[in-house]
């Protein structure tokens, strides 16, 4: 009996998702939410974290973890670069608003969030989307 693990490529492949359009739509809503919260005059903030590093880490971490479940492993570096570019672009836009400030340390926090999201992605942590699809698409008895 062969008990060897599956080949690495098979373990890292993106599963076939029947609701991929829904998952991608949710991802773009998440991106839009981050953009809006990044550009409104007075966004919600934790009193315990005046620099808002936790907000940056969690926002960009969630985005990366989400999209890493939707793209093949070979495309994850591109997804990470796009999210990092978004974080850099947002900082420049904030500097142009007059009511928000440009902060290079926020760029670093955003980038660290992307890396944390990548670490929380398959195969290290399961995707879960296939299981959710099974629940949503099961036929009533």
Image: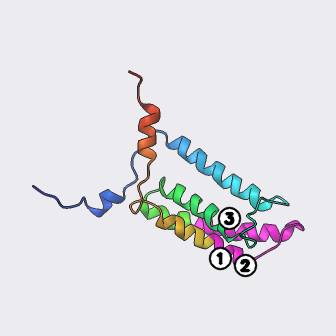
Q: Is residue 125 visible to us here? A: yes
Q: Is residue 47 magenta?
A: no
Q: Earlier in the sequence, mark 3 or mark 2?
A: 3
1 and 2 marks in contact (CB < 8 Å)? yes
| Among the two numbered marks 3 and 1 on one chain, the one whose residue lies closer to the N terminus | 3
- Residue 81 in the image, given as x and y percentages of width and height: 57, 68
Q: Nearer the viewer, residue 46 or 24?
A: 46
Q: Residue at x 76, y 66 (%)?
A: 47
User: In this orientation, which residue lies closer to the viewer: 110 or 125?
Assistant: 125
Q: Which label is found at residue 108?
A: 1
Say which residue appears at 64% left-offset and 70% top-offset: 110
Task: Say above or below: 51 vs 6.
Answer: below
Q: Position of residue 38 (x, y in %)?
A: 75, 61
What is the count of numbered marks?
3
Disc number for residue 104 = 2
Q: Residue 73 falls in which quadrant of the image?
A: bottom left
Disc 2 element:
helix
**Quadrant holding the C terminus:** top left
Question: Magenta: predominant secondary structure element?
Answer: helix
Q: Which residues are magenta?
A: 81-110
Q: Secondary structure at mark 1?
A: helix
Residue at point 80%, 67% (across, down) = 94
Quarter where residue 49 is shown: bottom right
Mark 1 → mark 2, Cα distance in angstroms: 7 Å
Q: Residue furthest left?
A: 1
Q: Quadrant of the N terminus?
A: bottom left
The residue identified by callout 3 is 55
Label 3 vs label 2, nearer the camera: 3
Decide if residue 95 is on the left or right side of residue 132.
Answer: right
Residue 17 in view in this figure:
no
Residue at x 84%, y 60% (from the top left corner): 42
Q: CA distance from mark 3 to mark 1?
A: 12 Å
């Amino acid at each position: 009996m062969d008990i060897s693990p599956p080949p690495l490529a098979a373990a890292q492949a993106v599963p076939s998702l029947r609701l991929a359009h829904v998952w991608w739509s949710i991802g773009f809503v998440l991106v839009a939410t981050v953009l809006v919260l990044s550009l409104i005059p007075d966004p919600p903030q934790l009193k315990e974290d005046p620099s808002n590093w936790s907000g940056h880490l969690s926002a960009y971490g969630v985005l990366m973890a989400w999209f890493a479940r939707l793209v093949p492993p070979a495309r994850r570096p591109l997804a990470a670069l796009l999210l990092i570019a978004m974080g850099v672009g947002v900082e420049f836009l904030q500097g142009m608003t007059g009511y928000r400030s440009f902060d290079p340390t926020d760029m670093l926090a955003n980038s660290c969030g992307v890396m944390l999201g990548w670490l929380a992605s398959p195969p290290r942590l399961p995707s879960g989307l296939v299981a959710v699809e099974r629940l949503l698409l099961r036929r009533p008895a």
